[in-house]
Amino acid sequence: MEATLISFWGAVLALSILIYVLLDGFDLGVGILFGLNRSEEQRRDMMGSIAPVWDGNETWLVVVGTVLFGAFPVVYSIFLSAFYLPVTLLLVALILRGVAFEFRYKTRRARWVWDIGFVAGSAVASFVQGAAIGAMVKGLAVEGRNFVGGPFDWLAPFPLLCGFGLVAGYALLGAAWLVLKTDGELRDWAYRWLPRLMNTVVAFVALALLMTLIGDFRVVHRWLAAPWLLLLPFAASIAAGQLCLAAEARGPDWQPYAMASLLFFTAYLMLAGSFWPWVVPYHLTLVDAAAPASSLAFLFWGAGVVVLPVILIYTGAVYWVFRGKVQSAKQYH
């Protein structure tokens, strides 16, 4: 029974992270691209495309934190100790972004202030997520069940590269979302950005791969031990090529977002396969880090049976209700 509960919460954690990246990734990406567009009408449509869903998307970040805290408290403790500053920056950025989202509609003279806040909040939130992933790939300083490194370990070159790479990746998702949800000049503008962002992401991935090989990271040995992981880059290459073809042909509009999501999905599988079964890479497995069986069972009946299905239903319902293209004449606010 305990092994089943551990597997269940491990699967919930993995699924929640994936859903968060795919959903909040595109609305953070729209926020990043917001700073590259100077048309007020198009900016309103950009915000209108994510207005009904952006706050619900961030619910999955709360789910991730809740599962870590309740089901894998040791992991929560280590990650919070290692990434205290990035987590603080992430929360501040998300708060600033949310406030800016609402306040820019209520002012004209100070609208530029909230525009900066919206772009900066989106970029910082994306950057610190990527830097945290890079720090985990590089390796955390853990002894036993405690983090023994410093508060600025995540500012090493490789994590910084991953941070900027995720900013570009989320912007790619955002551009693909704008193609899916908008029409006219904004759709054309997003189509023009797709190949540029795709090339940028490819450059970051190539540089990150080179750094892992030069640095002889432990993850490289994992790739050699599990060669099936090397099939995933081929799937990602096909998705990237199809995305570029769709951008060149300007259609169908659903394809860029589907291919960008497939890119992130293959990258996520690559990351998960490189770490499995470790939840704190190469230090603690899911079994090592799991809470007592009684805690897992209590969490299952409360969050697993009641809360999680409600969130899934709500997420699906919102995307169904607000499906289709954004209509400029019907502003969200």
Image (cartoon, rainbow, N blue to C red):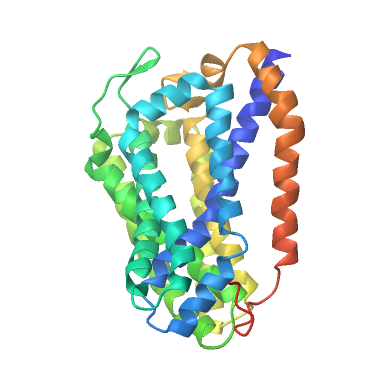
**Front one among 285 and 119:** 119
Q: Is residue 182 left or right of residue 223?
A: right
Total numbered labels: 0
**Residue 165 sits in quarter:** bottom left
Measured from the top left, where is residue 272 in percent x and y? 52, 37
Look at 51% across and 82% down and name the residue there.
186
* Quarter of the image that includes the C terminus: bottom right
Q: Position of residue 114 (x, y in %)?
A: 37, 67
In the rendered image, the vertical position of residue 117 relative to residue 65, given as above or below: below
Q: Can you see residue 236? A: no
Observer-nearest of 101 and 65: 101
21 relative to 154 in the view: left or right:
right
Residue 64, x across and y down, in percent: 55, 36
User: Could you tell me which residue is drawn at 39 percent across and 41 percent down?
Assistant: 133
Vertical placement of residue 331 versus 296, above or below: below
Name the image quarter holding residue 4. top right
**In screen coordinates, is 158 left or right of 8?**
left
* Quadrant assignment for the N terminus: top right
Q: Residue at image x 66%, y 19%? A: 296
Residue at the extreme bottom of the image, as rendered: 184
Q: Measured along the vertical axis of the image, is residue 6 above or below residue 194? A: above
Tell me which residue sits at (38%, 51%) in the image.
93
The location of residue 262, given as percent across then percent down, is 58, 57
User: In which quadrant of the rendered view does residue 67 lie?
Assistant: top right
